Image: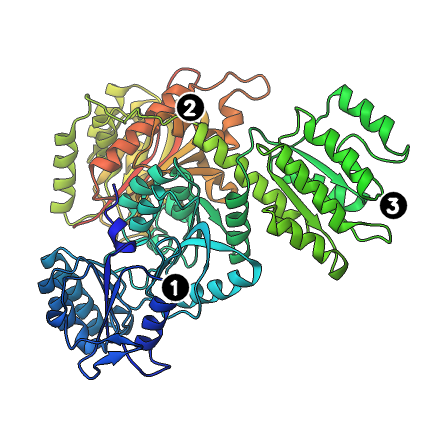
Amino acid sequence: MSQLKNFFDANSVAIIGASNTPGKIGYAILRNMLDCGYPGRIYPINPKDKEILGLAAYPSLAALPEKVDLAVISVPARLVLPVARECGEHGVKHLVTITAGFKELGKEGLEAEKELINICRQYGMRNLGPNCAGMMDTHVPINTSFAKGFPLKGDIAFYSQSGAMMIAILDWSRSIGLGFSKVVSLGNKADLSEIDFIEEAADDPYTRVILCYIEDVMDGARFLEVVGKATRKKPVIILKSGTSQAGALAASSHTGALAGSDLAYDTAFKQCGVIRARSMTELFDLAIAFSKCPVPRGDKVAIVTNSGGPGIITTDNVELKGLQMSRFTKETLDELRAGLPPEAGIYNPVDVLGDAKTDRYRFALEKVCADPNTDSVILLMCPTAVTEPVETSRVFIEMRDRYPEKPFFAAYMGGGSLQEGADMLAQAGIPCFTFPEPGINAIKELVNYGKFKNTPLAGDELVFPDVDKRAVKAIFYDVVKDNRLVLLGSEAYDVARAYGIPAAPIVLATSPDEAVEEAEKMGYPVVMKVASPKILHKTDVGGVKVGLKNAAEVRNAFVEIMENVTRLMPQAVVYGIEVQKMMPKGNELIIGMTRDVQFGPMIGCGLGGIYVNLLKDVSFRLARGLTRKEIEAMLAETKAYTLLRGYRGEQPSDIPALVEAIARVARLVLDFPEITEMDINPVFTYPNGLSALDVKITISLS
C-alpha cells in the first residue's frame, strides 16, 4: 500500500524560498498555491520579508506556529542540505525539492544528492526531486509547481521525468479541454519515482488512467512488482525515451546480440501489463481513449462512413492491428439493405454514400450499434456539400449514450467545415481524430488491455527441489580461481546437468587415450571439440570433428585438432579436447539469457543453429516472475512454434519438455546472478524430450 496520500493532501505547506519578486521561482510557487484554491495553511519562509503576497512570512521553520506536513524547497543548491536537515528536525514528512544543481551536474552534484537522501532517510522524510518542476493535484487542490496556470480537473494522472515536458503538456491540455487528477514532475528521482506514484494512483478514486513519460527505470525488480499490480486495477500507459545500456554490454553472445538496446523495456512492459506509447501524440491519444471509453467486450469493429476510400483504409488498419471486422447478423443486413440506397455498402464498412445527411447516418448507426457482433464503433466523415457535421455529431453522442458499454470513436477528415461537429464530440467525451488510424490503434489497445485484465494471474512459481546449487557453486568457484569468465563446454554441461537441463554428455580429455576411453563409455558416434575459452568459433580453426565412429578416428581427430589449433592460434591456451555424444538430428532451437541492468535476466527462445542471427526468430521474457504459461506464450510468438507443432507431416516436438527446460534455465540464472550470459545453441527437440548440444556460460567476477 502506498504511503503518499498525505503527500498530496497535506494540511499545511511551507514554501522555503518564497519571494515577493515576480519572475522568481519562489514567487511563482506561492502564487500558484494561492491561485489553485489550496484549502490548507500556507507558510512562506524567507528571512528577508515579513509578508509575501499578503501572507505572513517567517524566517525559518522553527518560527512557525505549527509543524507542517509538506515543505517545498526553492533555494540555491548550496542551501538545500541544511534546509532539508532543518525540515527533518522540524518533523516534516514530505519534501518537494525544486532546486537544480545535483547529479545532473556531475560528481559533486551526485554526492550532494546522495547526502540529501541520507538526510531524508535519517528523519523518515520522502522527497520529490531535486531538479523538478513540482506537483499538482486538481482534486485537493494543490499546486507546488512553478508552471504557468493550473490543469483542468480530470481523471488522468500524469508523471513526467522532464519538467519542461510537463509544463508544455499542461499548457497544451487546457487548449483542448483535457483534464488531470494529478500531475507530477519527477526530476532526478533521487527518492520518489514513477513507481511510487503509480502505486499511489492505482488506489486513487479520482484517477482512471495513469500516464508516464520516463527516461529510465531505476529499480527494475520493484517496478515489475508494483506496476504489475497497478495494471490489474487501471491502465498504465508509458512513453519511454532513450535506450537501456544492456544492449551495448551484451554483444558477446547470440542472445545479447538479438536482445538489442530497448527490448528489456518492451519485455518488462509486456509482462506487467503496461501499454507502451511510441510518441507523445500516441501517449495522449491513448490517455483520452482510456479516460473516455469503456474497455470493449471483444475485438469486432464496425465502421460507418460516407466515403468508400476512407472506409477501405480503415478496414485495412483494423486487420493490420489484429482486430476483427464486425460480421453483422442477417437481420441487420436485411434492414440495412432495405433502408439504404441500392449503391450503399452494407457489409462493413457501411458506406452511406457522399450525399448522406444526418437521417441516413442515424439509420445506419442505429442498426450497426444494436448488432450483437459490434463491440466498437468508428464513424468516418468527409466534408461534402450536404454533410451535416453538427447534427450527425448529436446523433453519434445519442448512440454512445444508448450503448455505453461500447467504445465510440470518430474521424472527421476535413478542416474548418467539420470543426464544430468534431468539437462537439470531444466535449461529449468521444475521441475524434482527423484520420482513422489513431482511433483504430486506441481500440486495439483497449481490447488488449481487456484481455490482459481478464487473464487470471498465473502463480506457478518456478521451483525445482531436485537442482544441485552446491555443484554449480563449486564449478563457478573453480572457474574464477582459474581467472576465467567463460566456462569450458564440459563445465557448462555439468551446470546444465545440476539443474536438470537435458544436454548431450560432454567430457574433457587431455590425451588421445583418455579421449578414446571417454568415447567408448558414452558410445559412438561422438563429436570432438577444442576446449579453449579464447577460441569462440572452433570450426574456423579446424577445432571440431564430427561423426567419429571408432577408437582410431577419435585418436586421429585428437591429434589433428591439436595440430590445427597450434598452427592457426599458437597463443591460445588449450585445456584439452572435449568428447561429446553425437545426438540425432532434431528441430534446432536456441535458449539463451542476457542480463539487463534494470530488469535482470532476460530469457529468449526461438529458431537456433547457424541462422539464428540472420533470421532473428526469438521471443523474450524476463526470468523474474516467469511462469510456464508465459513460457508457452513466448514460444507461440515465434515462427519456430510452427515447426514444434509439426510441419508438413513431421511429428510434433515435445513442447512440455521444452517449456520445462526453459523454466529450469530461468531458475538457474535467477539463483546465480553471476551468470551474465548463457547460450544453448542448438537445442535439438524431439517427439519425446530434447537435448542441448552446445552450452555457453559467461560469469562475472563480482
Residue 171 vs 426, above or below: the answer is below
Mark 1 residue type = Cys
Q: Are marks 2 and 3 in contact (CB under 8 Å)?
A: no
Closest to the observer, 688 or 553:
688
Q: Are marks 3 and 1 in contact (CB under 8 Å)?
A: no
Query: On the rendered structure, is 44 left or right of 281?
Result: left
Residue assigned mark 1: 36
Residue 444 location in percent, x, y?
Answer: 57, 39
> Between tags 2 and 3, which lies in front?
3
Residue assigned mark 2: 685
| Marks 3 and 1, how far apart at CA | 49 Å
Q: Are marks 2 and 1 in contact (CB under 8 Å)?
A: no
* Disc 3 residue crowd, few under 14, some 14–19, many 20+, Cα 10 Å: few
Query: On the rendered structure, is 85 left or right of 199?
Result: left
Secondary structure, mark 2, is: strand
Give the residue drawn at x 11%, y 68%.
Answer: 86
Secondary structure, mark 1, is: loop
